[in-house]
Amino acid sequence: MCSEVLMMTKLDLTDGGSMTSEMQNSAAGNAAAGISIRDLNVYYKGLHVLKGINIEIEPKKITVMMGPSGCGKSTLVRVLNRMNDEVEGFRHTGQVMLDGKDVYDKDVDPVLLKTRVGMVFQKPNPFPISIYENVAFGPRIHKIFRSKQQLDECVKDSLQKAALWEEVKDRLKENAMKLSGGQQQRLCIARTLAVKPEVILLDEPASALDPGSASKIEELMVELKRSFTVVLVTHNMQQAARVATKVIFLYKGDIVETGEAPGIFENPTKELTEKYIRGQLV
Amino acid sequence: MTESNLATVTEVVMPWQDSRVKSNYRRRQILDKVMKVLALIAVVVVLFPLLDMLYLFAYKGLSVLSISILTETTSGGGTGSSTGGIENAIVGSCLLIGLSSLIAVPLGVFSGVYLAEFTSLHNKFAEAIRFISDVLAGVPSIVLGYVGFLAFVLYLHWGYSAMASAVTLSILMLPYIIRTTELSIRRVPDSIREGAIALGSTKSSMINRLTLRFALPGIITGVMLAVSISFSETAPLLYTADFNNYLPTALFHQPVGFLTYIVYVYSNLPYQSAHNLAYAASFVLLSFVFVVNLFARVVLKRFSKI
């Protein structure tokens, strides 16, 4: 299975040599950051959602969060870029260190944090504006570029990295809603890449897509790993086995088991993990 | 045993063979037709007077309409031979609508944005604003006119004036604009907001670049509705604008003419020329409402394509 993925990556390499050199450039520009979570507790009003979590998320690896619905994996991912701030009754203790700095420190701006930690959601949510404007949205609001030319290049670059450029280069002015579900999701990834994040959070990015589109997203994730820290939430065991470097298995707000993939799927040490993998855990 | 079972099976009458079911079905078929005819009659009853009215005003209006009636100002109040034209009223009405829109549209849209984006649905303060806004929409316009008279004409010493009228009209327009703005912004899916926030967008740039854009057709429809309602208002203007036979030259301390006044007053005068003015004014009013609605539809179609 692993060798298959490697094959795909190799194919991609030969397919677009320029693409990878650009990716290396950007990797040199902003080094992918690691995240270490220490004694993290999260509460929603009275509910204790995450219970004393300790995780190391390494740079340029794919860390996969797994577990049954309601285990807290989405909450955990949303803590990393503070998407939970607006949720009523949200409270946390502990630290989420991004590159040695707690993202919940008072002097960290939650808006600017999101340019370092990007996020892609389960359901593709392109803005109903043109494909170009979707990708340009982030750079525009942050005024990253001074000239139209630089912005054009960034849009092209981001779309290439998201493996969408070839399909949309002749219709950048078209409305993004006209794209297929899989294309929309890749557009959302391109949009996230355009603000040059260091960490990319993917919350079940392929679960709403057909198998073909899903495998394209999967290939893309492996590609992204080269330059970014990737955190993936998924229910799909095969997908996790194919792409993961490290798997974290959560159950009811606790970490049950952490392990390297694909080993954890073949020899889980905990009974709960084994049950989940066999599909016996509800 | 099996034979008798078979026999009973063949004896069973299926619903479609049952005579009771059949006759009942015939009754239901008749009822179906009756309902259809009743609905059609209702439509005709509603539509006929409406079309008749439109025809009357179009016919009468067009037959009296002339360059001079549109370019002359009213004279005297109809002493018989000549009553002039309605230019002062057309200009006055447009001035009032322009001024009141200038006040009500930004205020209303911003209030709607506040309610939709900065308060949760069950926020006490937001609910209070919504309630007050609903009450305001239900206040009879003549009461509002009297309030305008007391507050602007007398208390603020603006006198009968375009400003006093425009502010009164804008109060009348606000609830419609606030409500439609809030509703159309709330219809924008949350996934869009989440996407923008995840890209590091602040709330205001998200509103500017995405939600307002989405909600624009709805907001424009609300504004158009408010504009046509206040364009056809009479009562609050009688209290605040009075009337003027001349073109407006000042916003304060000068009464201003408006179209509905001509319809209201000149149709009661015993002169044909006065009636003609009333018909012309009605025709202009109807055309305006027609054009505004048409415009709203075109805008809605164009923007809902995105």
Image: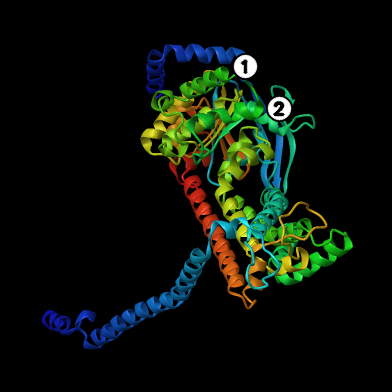
Q: Which mark is residue A97?
A: 2
Q: Nearer the viewer, residue B194 or A5?
A: B194
Location of residue B210 with respect to B101 vertically, above or below: above
Q: Quadrant of the N terminus of chain B?
A: bottom left
Q: How many marks?
A: 2
Q: Amino acid at mark 1?
A: Ala
- Of discs 1 and 2, which sits in the foreground? 1
Left or right: residue A111 versus residue B48 is right
Which residue extends farthest left?
Answer: B3
Residue B250, placed above or below residue A141:
below
Is the residue marked by circle 2 packed among few (<14), some (14-19), or many (20+) residues within 10 Å? many
Q: Position of residue B90 (x, y in %)?
A: 63, 58
Query: What type is the residue that disc 2 sits on?
Result: Met
SS under mark 2: strand
Of residues A78 and B242, the one nearer the viewer is B242
**Callout 1 environment at 10 Å: few (<14), some (14 to 19), or many (20+)?**
some
* Badge number at residue A31: 1
Asked which quadrant contains residue B201, the reply is top right
Q: Chain of mark 2?
A: A
